[in-house]
Amino acid sequence: MSKLNQFLIYDELPVWSAPFGLTLLDTIRLNHGMNILDIGSGSGFPMLEIAERAGLSCNIIGIDPSDDSFSMINRKIRLKKITNARIVQGLAEELPFDDGIFDLVVANNGLNNVADQEKSLLECFRVSGNGAQLVFTVNLPGTMIEFYEIFEQVLSELGMDKEIGAMKDHIVQKRKTVEYLKQLILKTGFTIQTINVDGFKMRYLDGSAFLNHYFIRTAFLPSWKKIIPGKSQKKVFTILEKKLNETAQKDGILTMSVPFVCFDCHKP
């Protein structure tokens, strides 16, 4: 096996999804002969880890709408010679599976990026068998609260009240509260066994390092920039970076909090 392929195999735990996924792995209950569904499989974690931990008596199917995810996971499956896992392309709102066929459904930060959470949970309920377990993680509204507080301060100083409203709407749209999710889960027919609220910290030397971090640039920055009119973006983000750097200098480091929740649910 080439060195590149070896690195691909070992580079399987994205830093962002690791804390969520490790909690999920501690929550699922495995039995022989299970059919398992992973929603929003991304780069293959924790889907492929579950496949290997469950063993050959179990089968796991991952679903993700991305062409890149489909290709990457298929490559990892081949390299690792995993025979009890496969990936399909599709949406959580329209799962291409028969009713009641899964014993375990998991989603590691996969249900907070769907277009319709309620419809996705209804689909999870439909494809779950009686007594099936649903375990999913999502990050909570306090995610990177340190950034958003400084962002709001900058917008307020510039008199951009409309943009402050848009920022708050963005947070509400992307990150639901524990209580909201609890009610949605119950509404879609599942019962809740446990709710595990946890979190972790992401630390950066300063604001420049934070804003230039690849994950921040690709996963968060485009949405933040959409909040600001094009002609004002450069000014806003120049001031924002300066204030983030000042905070880092004062505190010795720039810290971002990432609270999340893991729901352990069951289909009666």
Image (spheres, grey):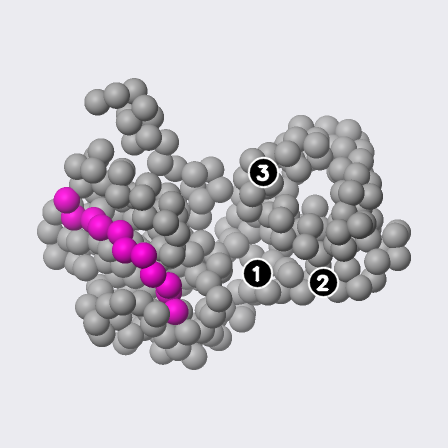
Q: Name the residue under label 2.
A: 166
Label 2 to label 3: alpha-carbon separation: 25 Å
Above or below, 138 relative to 16: below
* Badge 3: residue crowd in 10 Å (few <14, some 14–19, many ≥20): few
Residue 217 in view, yes or no: yes
Q: What residue is pinned by disc 1?
A: 174
Nearer to us of marks 2 and 1 is: 2
What are the residue bounds of the magenta stretch? 83-93
At 39% from the left edge and 69% from the top edge, which residue is drawn? Answer: 93
Q: Which mark is residue 202?
A: 3
Earlier sequence position, callout 1 versus callout 3: 1
The residue tagged with tag 3: helix, strand or loop?
strand
> Between residues 263 and 15, which one lies in front from this camera angle?
15
Write the residue at 28% across / 27% down.
5
Alpha carbons under labels 1 and 3: distance apart: 19 Å
Residue 128, image x, y percentages: 26, 70
Residue 256 picture location, percent across and down: 63, 42
Q: Type of residue at label 2?
A: Ala
Q: In which quarter of the image is the N terminus?
A: top left
Relative horizontal placement of residue 79, taking residue 252 as reference (left or right): left
Which amino acid, mark 3?
Met
**Residue 49 lies in the magenta-colored region:** no
Kindly identify the residue that appears in the image at 58 percent across and 38 percent down. 202
Task: Give residue 89's position: percent from left, percent from top.
Answer: 32, 57
Residue 256 sits above or below residue 224 on the image: above
Q: What is the three-letter code of the residue carrying label 1? A: Lys
Instruction: Tell me the element at label 1.
Output: helix
